[in-house]
Image (tube, helix red, strand yellow):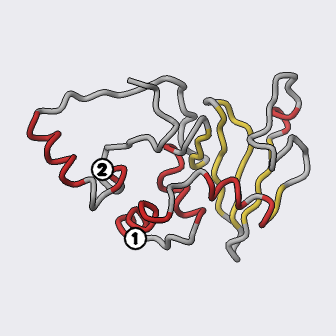
Amino acid sequence: MKRLIVYLNGERVGALDEDESGLLDFRYAPEWTGRSDAMPLSRSLPLQSEPFRGKHARPFFAGILPDEGPRQQIAAILGISERNDFAMLERIGGECAGAVSLLPEDAPAPILGETHVRELSERELEDIVAELPRRPLMAGREGLRLSLAGSGTGR
């Protein structure tokens, strides 16, 4: 079984698992559901201690991934199937839309508002812009992570 930790606004809210058959399973962490200020990830995933399996978990997590065109390109660049939601989340889940992040268990928790900025030369910027049609979100470029729509900080 594979596992990704699910964060909301930088706080751990649960875990998304994929079994050997590719079935997704999401469960809120007890420490999250026990909080007075806990909120659900979505209306389709209300706060509860029981897991959401398969068709109950997949729509939300598939929905935070890029749309079909960019998704196909990103999958091709990363060498994964465009239909494998879990593999896509494994690779780019730290940059999902909105306030949700998915990271491997051994990865440090996201720090809200933390950004690493590197000034680009005019030539570097031109190269990146020229590469975007072939490499949406700069997928696969080592050391470069760009946020998907909705998750930017406005900087």
Q: Earlier in the sequence, mark 2 or mark 1?
A: 1
Provide the residue designation for mark 1.
Answer: 79
Label 1 is placed on what type of residue? Gly
Provide the residue designation for mark 2.
Answer: 142
Residue at figure coordinates x 43%, y 68% from the top left? 72
Label 2, residues with CA under 10 Å away: few <14, some 14-19, many ≥20: few
Q: Is residue 142 above or below residue 116?
A: below
Residue at figure coordinates x 49%, y 73% from the top left? 81
Q: Is residue 42 above or below residue 155?
A: below
**Splitting the image into 4 quarters, where does residue 73 fall?**
bottom left
Instruction: Locate residue 84 relative to residue 149 in the image: left or right.
Output: right
Q: Where's residue 131, x and y in %?
A: 22, 54
Residue at figure coordinates x 27%, y 58% from the top left? 133
Q: Is residue 120 above or below residue 4?
A: above
Instruction: Locate residue 146 relative to residue 124 in the image: left or right.
Output: right
Q: Are marks 2 and 1 in contact (CB under 8 Å)?
A: no
Mark drawn on residue 17:
none
Instruction: Locate residue 133 relative to residue 25 in the image: left or right.
Output: left
Q: Where's residue 28, x and y in %?
A: 80, 44
